[in-house]
Amino acid sequence: MSRRRIALGYAGFGLFALAAIAAGLWWGAARLDAAPPGTPEGEWIRRIVWELRAPRVLTAFWAGAALGLAGAALQALFQNVLAEPYTLGVSSGAAFGAALFFALGGASGLGAGGTALAGAAAALFLVQLLVRLSRRPSAEGLILAGAAVNAFFGALVSLLMVFAGEELRAIVYWLFGSVAGRSWPTVLGLGGLVAAGFVGLYAERRRLDALLFGETAALAVGVDVVTLRRRVAFLASALAAGVVAAAGVIGFVGLVAPHVVRRFGAPMHRHLLPLAALFGGGWLVAADLIARWALAPRELPLGVVTALVGAPLFAWLLVRREALSGDDRDAR
Protein backbone atom coordinates (compact mmCIF):
# COMPACT_ATOMS: atom_id res chain seq x y z
CA MET A 1 0.00 0.00 0.00
CA SER A 2 1.17 3.53 -0.76
CA ARG A 3 1.55 5.98 2.11
CA ARG A 4 -1.29 8.04 0.68
CA ARG A 5 -3.64 5.05 0.65
CA ILE A 6 -2.60 4.09 4.18
CA ALA A 7 -3.26 7.64 5.41
CA LEU A 8 -6.65 7.62 3.67
CA GLY A 9 -7.49 4.30 5.32
CA TYR A 10 -6.73 5.50 8.83
CA ALA A 11 -8.48 8.82 8.22
CA GLY A 12 -11.55 7.19 6.67
CA PHE A 13 -12.04 4.45 9.24
CA GLY A 14 -11.18 6.85 12.07
CA LEU A 15 -13.73 9.42 10.89
CA PHE A 16 -16.32 6.69 10.51
CA ALA A 17 -15.75 5.58 14.11
CA LEU A 18 -15.82 9.16 15.44
CA ALA A 19 -19.01 9.94 13.49
CA ALA A 20 -20.71 6.82 14.86
CA ILE A 21 -19.68 7.68 18.43
CA ALA A 22 -20.87 11.29 18.04
CA ALA A 23 -24.21 10.09 16.64
CA GLY A 24 -24.60 7.62 19.49
CA LEU A 25 -23.99 10.34 22.06
CA TRP A 26 -26.35 12.82 20.40
CA TRP A 27 -29.33 10.70 19.36
CA GLY A 28 -31.57 8.85 21.75
CA ALA A 29 -35.04 8.64 23.25
CA ALA A 30 -34.41 11.74 25.41
CA ARG A 31 -33.76 15.06 23.66
CA LEU A 32 -30.73 16.95 24.96
CA ASP A 33 -32.46 20.31 24.44
CA ALA A 34 -35.61 19.31 26.36
CA ALA A 35 -34.65 19.30 30.03
CA PRO A 36 -37.54 18.66 32.49
CA PRO A 37 -38.81 21.72 34.38
CA GLY A 38 -36.60 22.55 37.34
CA THR A 39 -33.57 20.67 35.94
CA PRO A 40 -30.65 22.83 34.73
CA GLU A 41 -29.79 22.16 31.10
CA GLY A 42 -26.15 21.40 31.91
CA GLU A 43 -27.14 18.86 34.56
CA TRP A 44 -29.63 17.26 32.17
CA ILE A 45 -27.02 16.88 29.44
CA ARG A 46 -24.50 15.49 31.91
CA ARG A 47 -26.95 12.86 33.10
CA ILE A 48 -28.02 11.75 29.64
CA VAL A 49 -24.67 11.88 27.87
CA TRP A 50 -22.15 11.07 30.60
CA GLU A 51 -24.11 8.64 32.76
CA LEU A 52 -26.26 6.85 30.16
CA ARG A 53 -25.12 7.20 26.56
CA ALA A 54 -21.33 7.44 26.85
CA PRO A 55 -20.88 4.10 28.69
CA ARG A 56 -23.21 2.41 26.22
CA VAL A 57 -21.51 3.85 23.13
CA LEU A 58 -17.98 3.21 24.36
CA THR A 59 -18.84 -0.34 25.42
CA ALA A 60 -20.11 -0.94 21.88
CA PHE A 61 -16.94 0.58 20.41
CA TRP A 62 -14.60 -1.53 22.53
CA ALA A 63 -16.66 -4.67 21.88
CA GLY A 64 -16.53 -4.09 18.12
CA ALA A 65 -12.79 -3.38 18.26
CA ALA A 66 -12.23 -6.59 20.25
CA LEU A 67 -14.21 -8.66 17.75
CA GLY A 68 -12.41 -7.06 14.81
CA LEU A 69 -9.04 -7.93 16.35
CA ALA A 70 -10.14 -11.46 17.28
CA GLY A 71 -11.51 -12.06 13.77
CA ALA A 72 -8.30 -10.90 12.08
CA ALA A 73 -6.21 -13.06 14.44
CA LEU A 74 -8.32 -16.20 13.94
CA GLN A 75 -8.33 -15.79 10.17
CA ALA A 76 -4.53 -15.74 10.23
CA LEU A 77 -4.42 -18.63 12.69
CA PHE A 78 -6.56 -20.86 10.46
CA GLN A 79 -5.56 -19.20 7.14
CA ASN A 80 -9.25 -18.86 6.34
CA VAL A 81 -11.26 -15.66 5.80
CA LEU A 82 -14.39 -17.39 7.14
CA ALA A 83 -12.97 -17.75 10.64
CA GLU A 84 -14.23 -15.47 13.41
CA PRO A 85 -15.34 -15.96 17.05
CA TYR A 86 -19.01 -16.54 16.22
CA THR A 87 -18.64 -18.93 13.27
CA LEU A 88 -16.03 -21.01 15.12
CA GLY A 89 -18.19 -21.42 18.21
CA VAL A 90 -15.82 -19.41 20.41
CA SER A 91 -18.57 -16.94 21.32
CA SER A 92 -20.93 -19.84 22.07
CA GLY A 93 -18.34 -21.38 24.36
CA ALA A 94 -17.89 -18.05 26.13
CA ALA A 95 -21.68 -17.70 26.42
CA PHE A 96 -21.89 -21.12 28.06
CA GLY A 97 -19.18 -20.14 30.54
CA ALA A 98 -20.98 -16.91 31.45
CA ALA A 99 -24.37 -18.65 31.57
CA LEU A 100 -22.99 -21.33 33.88
CA PHE A 101 -21.68 -18.62 36.19
CA PHE A 102 -25.10 -16.97 36.38
CA ALA A 103 -26.93 -20.29 36.74
CA LEU A 104 -24.80 -21.02 39.81
CA GLY A 105 -25.89 -17.72 41.34
CA GLY A 106 -22.94 -15.53 40.39
CA ALA A 107 -23.41 -11.80 39.95
CA SER A 108 -19.91 -10.40 39.43
CA GLY A 109 -18.91 -9.26 35.95
CA LEU A 110 -15.32 -10.30 36.69
CA GLY A 111 -16.41 -13.81 37.58
CA ALA A 112 -18.50 -14.04 34.42
CA GLY A 113 -15.49 -12.93 32.40
CA GLY A 114 -13.34 -15.69 33.88
CA THR A 115 -15.80 -18.46 33.15
CA ALA A 116 -16.47 -16.98 29.69
CA LEU A 117 -12.73 -17.14 28.95
CA ALA A 118 -12.62 -20.78 30.02
CA GLY A 119 -15.57 -21.57 27.74
CA ALA A 120 -14.06 -19.69 24.81
CA ALA A 121 -10.72 -21.45 25.19
CA ALA A 122 -12.45 -24.83 25.39
CA ALA A 123 -14.43 -24.11 22.23
CA LEU A 124 -11.34 -23.03 20.28
CA PHE A 125 -9.46 -26.13 21.46
CA LEU A 126 -12.31 -28.34 20.26
CA VAL A 127 -12.34 -26.62 16.85
CA GLN A 128 -8.60 -27.12 16.42
CA LEU A 129 -8.89 -30.74 17.51
CA LEU A 130 -11.73 -31.47 15.09
CA VAL A 131 -9.89 -29.80 12.19
CA ARG A 132 -6.84 -31.95 12.85
CA LEU A 133 -8.90 -35.14 13.07
CA SER A 134 -10.95 -34.34 9.96
CA ARG A 135 -9.86 -35.72 6.60
CA ARG A 136 -11.73 -33.00 4.72
CA PRO A 137 -10.01 -29.98 3.16
CA SER A 138 -9.07 -27.41 5.80
CA ALA A 139 -11.64 -24.77 4.78
CA GLU A 140 -14.54 -27.20 4.73
CA GLY A 141 -13.33 -28.93 7.87
CA LEU A 142 -13.09 -25.62 9.72
CA ILE A 143 -16.67 -24.65 8.84
CA LEU A 144 -18.01 -28.05 9.90
CA ALA A 145 -15.97 -28.02 13.11
CA GLY A 146 -17.26 -24.53 13.96
CA ALA A 147 -20.85 -25.59 13.30
CA ALA A 148 -20.44 -28.66 15.50
CA VAL A 149 -18.90 -26.70 18.38
CA ASN A 150 -21.59 -24.02 18.04
CA ALA A 151 -24.32 -26.67 18.24
CA PHE A 152 -22.67 -28.41 21.20
CA PHE A 153 -22.32 -25.30 23.36
CA GLY A 154 -25.73 -24.05 22.24
CA ALA A 155 -27.21 -27.29 23.52
CA LEU A 156 -25.39 -26.88 26.84
CA VAL A 157 -26.77 -23.34 27.21
CA SER A 158 -30.28 -24.63 26.44
CA LEU A 159 -29.82 -27.32 29.08
CA LEU A 160 -28.83 -24.67 31.62
CA MET A 161 -31.94 -22.68 30.74
CA VAL A 162 -34.14 -25.71 31.39
CA PHE A 163 -32.84 -26.06 34.94
CA ALA A 164 -32.33 -22.35 35.69
CA GLY A 165 -34.80 -20.56 37.93
CA GLU A 166 -34.51 -16.85 38.60
CA GLU A 167 -31.24 -16.82 36.67
CA LEU A 168 -33.08 -17.59 33.39
CA ARG A 169 -33.55 -13.91 32.53
CA ALA A 170 -29.83 -13.21 32.90
CA ILE A 171 -28.93 -16.16 30.67
CA VAL A 172 -31.36 -15.12 27.94
CA TYR A 173 -30.01 -11.58 28.18
CA TRP A 174 -26.46 -12.76 27.38
CA LEU A 175 -27.64 -14.77 24.41
CA PHE A 176 -29.14 -11.87 22.45
CA GLY A 177 -26.41 -9.28 22.95
CA SER A 178 -26.90 -5.73 24.21
CA VAL A 179 -24.90 -2.75 25.45
CA ALA A 180 -27.84 -1.04 27.18
CA GLY A 181 -27.36 0.01 30.79
CA ARG A 182 -23.58 -0.37 30.82
CA SER A 183 -21.46 1.44 33.41
CA TRP A 184 -18.04 3.07 33.41
CA PRO A 185 -16.34 0.09 35.12
CA THR A 186 -17.46 -2.06 32.17
CA VAL A 187 -16.05 0.50 29.72
CA LEU A 188 -12.71 0.69 31.52
CA GLY A 189 -12.42 -3.07 31.95
CA LEU A 190 -13.23 -3.88 28.33
CA GLY A 191 -11.05 -1.03 27.08
CA GLY A 192 -8.11 -2.33 29.08
CA LEU A 193 -8.65 -5.84 27.68
CA VAL A 194 -8.74 -4.51 24.11
CA ALA A 195 -5.56 -2.49 24.66
CA ALA A 196 -3.74 -5.52 26.06
CA GLY A 197 -5.05 -7.76 23.27
CA PHE A 198 -4.01 -5.28 20.61
CA VAL A 199 -0.49 -4.94 22.03
CA GLY A 200 -0.13 -8.72 22.22
CA LEU A 201 -1.37 -9.34 18.68
CA TYR A 202 0.52 -6.40 17.17
CA ALA A 203 3.74 -7.77 18.64
CA GLU A 204 3.10 -10.92 16.59
CA ARG A 205 2.24 -9.05 13.37
CA ARG A 206 5.25 -10.20 11.33
CA ARG A 207 4.86 -13.82 12.42
CA LEU A 208 1.14 -13.65 11.57
CA ASP A 209 2.10 -12.34 8.12
CA ALA A 210 4.42 -15.31 7.66
CA LEU A 211 1.66 -17.71 8.75
CA LEU A 212 -0.56 -16.41 5.94
CA PHE A 213 1.70 -18.27 3.49
CA GLY A 214 1.30 -21.57 5.34
CA GLU A 215 3.02 -23.37 8.20
CA THR A 216 5.87 -24.61 6.00
CA ALA A 217 6.73 -21.08 4.84
CA ALA A 218 6.47 -19.77 8.41
CA LEU A 219 8.79 -22.49 9.72
CA ALA A 220 11.24 -21.74 6.91
CA VAL A 221 11.67 -18.15 8.12
CA GLY A 222 12.15 -19.21 11.74
CA VAL A 223 8.65 -18.84 13.19
CA ASP A 224 7.82 -21.09 16.14
CA VAL A 225 4.37 -21.98 14.82
CA VAL A 226 3.25 -23.97 17.87
CA THR A 227 4.02 -21.14 20.30
CA LEU A 228 2.52 -18.57 17.94
CA ARG A 229 -0.72 -20.54 17.66
CA ARG A 230 -1.01 -20.83 21.44
CA ARG A 231 -0.46 -17.10 21.99
CA VAL A 232 -2.84 -16.02 19.26
CA ALA A 233 -5.49 -18.53 20.33
CA PHE A 234 -5.31 -17.27 23.93
CA LEU A 235 -5.51 -13.59 22.95
CA ALA A 236 -8.39 -14.16 20.51
CA SER A 237 -10.26 -16.23 23.12
CA ALA A 238 -9.72 -13.55 25.78
CA LEU A 239 -11.04 -10.82 23.48
CA ALA A 240 -14.12 -12.84 22.52
CA ALA A 241 -14.79 -13.79 26.14
CA GLY A 242 -14.49 -10.15 27.24
CA VAL A 243 -17.12 -9.14 24.70
CA VAL A 244 -19.51 -11.88 25.82
CA ALA A 245 -19.05 -10.93 29.48
CA ALA A 246 -19.66 -7.24 28.71
CA ALA A 247 -22.27 -7.36 25.93
CA GLY A 248 -23.43 -10.92 25.31
CA VAL A 249 -23.16 -12.90 22.09
CA ILE A 250 -22.60 -10.65 19.05
CA GLY A 251 -21.79 -12.39 15.79
CA PHE A 252 -20.12 -11.63 12.48
CA VAL A 253 -18.33 -8.38 13.45
CA GLY A 254 -15.08 -10.35 13.41
CA LEU A 255 -15.93 -11.48 9.89
CA VAL A 256 -17.07 -8.14 8.47
CA ALA A 257 -14.32 -5.88 9.85
CA PRO A 258 -11.20 -7.71 8.52
CA HIS A 259 -12.97 -8.36 5.20
CA VAL A 260 -13.76 -4.67 4.67
CA VAL A 261 -10.20 -3.68 5.57
CA ARG A 262 -8.72 -6.24 3.16
CA ARG A 263 -11.01 -5.03 0.38
CA PHE A 264 -9.54 -1.60 1.02
CA GLY A 265 -6.12 -3.10 0.34
CA ALA A 266 -4.51 -3.78 3.73
CA PRO A 267 -3.83 -7.53 4.00
CA MET A 268 -0.70 -7.30 6.20
CA HIS A 269 -1.25 -7.24 9.96
CA ARG A 270 0.74 -4.05 10.54
CA HIS A 271 -2.29 -2.18 9.23
CA LEU A 272 -4.96 -4.90 9.25
CA LEU A 273 -5.10 -5.11 13.06
CA PRO A 274 -5.55 -1.40 13.89
CA LEU A 275 -7.88 -0.76 10.95
CA ALA A 276 -10.02 -3.82 11.76
CA ALA A 277 -10.30 -2.57 15.35
CA LEU A 278 -11.29 0.93 14.17
CA PHE A 279 -13.88 -0.29 11.70
CA GLY A 280 -15.21 -3.00 14.01
CA GLY A 281 -15.70 -0.47 16.80
CA GLY A 282 -17.39 2.07 14.56
CA TRP A 283 -19.60 -0.56 12.94
CA LEU A 284 -20.86 -1.92 16.25
CA VAL A 285 -21.69 1.60 17.50
CA ALA A 286 -23.62 2.17 14.26
CA ALA A 287 -25.35 -1.21 14.67
CA ASP A 288 -26.41 -0.22 18.19
CA LEU A 289 -27.93 2.97 16.78
CA ILE A 290 -29.91 0.86 14.31
CA ALA A 291 -30.98 -1.45 17.14
CA ARG A 292 -32.26 1.56 19.10
CA TRP A 293 -34.11 3.25 16.25
CA ALA A 294 -35.38 0.49 13.95
CA LEU A 295 -38.41 -0.38 16.12
CA ALA A 296 -38.37 2.56 18.56
CA PRO A 297 -39.38 2.75 21.35
CA ARG A 298 -38.56 -0.99 21.45
CA GLU A 299 -34.97 -2.12 20.91
CA LEU A 300 -33.70 -4.87 18.66
CA PRO A 301 -31.07 -7.21 20.13
CA LEU A 302 -27.66 -6.03 18.94
CA GLY A 303 -26.72 -9.54 17.80
CA VAL A 304 -29.73 -9.57 15.43
CA VAL A 305 -28.56 -6.40 13.65
CA THR A 306 -25.00 -7.64 13.14
CA ALA A 307 -26.26 -11.04 11.93
CA LEU A 308 -28.52 -9.41 9.33
CA VAL A 309 -25.41 -7.89 7.75
CA GLY A 310 -22.82 -10.55 8.55
CA ALA A 311 -24.75 -13.72 7.65
CA PRO A 312 -25.24 -12.75 3.96
CA LEU A 313 -21.56 -11.79 3.76
CA PHE A 314 -20.58 -15.14 5.26
CA ALA A 315 -22.76 -16.94 2.70
CA TRP A 316 -21.26 -14.91 -0.16
CA LEU A 317 -17.70 -15.63 0.98
CA LEU A 318 -18.52 -19.33 1.33
CA VAL A 319 -20.05 -19.56 -2.16
CA ARG A 320 -17.19 -17.54 -3.66
CA ARG A 321 -14.60 -19.73 -1.97
CA GLU A 322 -16.27 -22.91 -3.18
CA ALA A 323 -16.50 -21.50 -6.71
CA LEU A 324 -12.79 -20.68 -6.72
CA SER A 325 -11.98 -24.14 -5.37
CA GLY A 326 -14.07 -25.68 -8.14
CA ASP A 327 -12.21 -23.65 -10.78
CA ASP A 328 -8.88 -24.85 -9.36
CA ARG A 329 -10.03 -28.49 -9.53
CA ASP A 330 -11.20 -28.03 -13.12
CA ALA A 331 -7.85 -26.50 -14.05
CA ARG A 332 -6.02 -29.52 -12.68
Image (tube, rainbow, N blue to C red):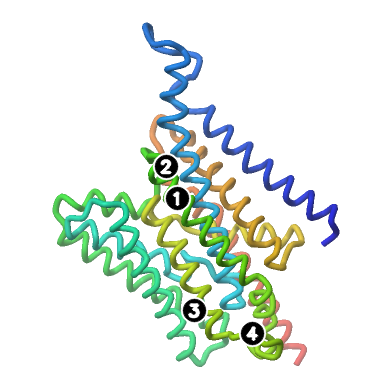
Residue 332 position (above or below residue 39): below
Q: Nearer the viewer, mark 3 or mark 1?
A: 3
- Is mark 2 in CB contact (under 8 Å) with mark 1? yes
In this orientation, which residue lies closer to the viewer: 255 or 1? 1
- Where in the figure is residue 273, as x and y percent of width and height? 63, 61
Considering every residue shown, the one lying at the far top of the view is 38
Q: Tell me the residue that label 3 is attached to.
A: 230
Q: Tell me the residue that label 1 is attached to.
A: 304
In this orientation, which residue lies closer to the viewer: 173 or 94? 94
Q: Tell me the residue that label 2 is attached to.
A: 300
Q: CA distance from mark 3 to mark 2?
A: 36 Å
Q: CA distance from mark 2 to mark 1?
A: 7 Å
Q: CA distance from mark 4 to mark 1?
A: 40 Å
- Is mark 4 in CB contact (under 8 Å) with mark 1? no
Amino acid type, callout 1 = Val
Amino acid type, callout 2 = Leu
- Is mark 3 in CB contact (under 8 Å) with mark 2? no
User: What element does badge 1 sit on?
Assistant: helix
| N-terminal label among 4 and 1 | 4
| N-terminal label among 3 and 4 | 4
Q: CA distance from mark 3 to mark 1?
A: 31 Å
Q: How many marks?
A: 4
Categorize mark 2 by other alpha carbons within 10 Å: few (<14), some (14-19), many (20+): many
| N-terminal label among 3 and 1 | 3
Amino acid type, callout 3 = Arg
Q: Nearer the viewer, mark 4 or mark 1?
A: 4
- Is mark 3 in CB contact (under 8 Å) with mark 1? no
State the residue at coordinates (71%, 87%).
221
- Is mark 4 in CB contact (under 8 Å) with mark 2? no
Q: CA distance from mark 3 to mark 4?
A: 13 Å
Q: Tell me the residue that label 4 is attached to.
A: 223
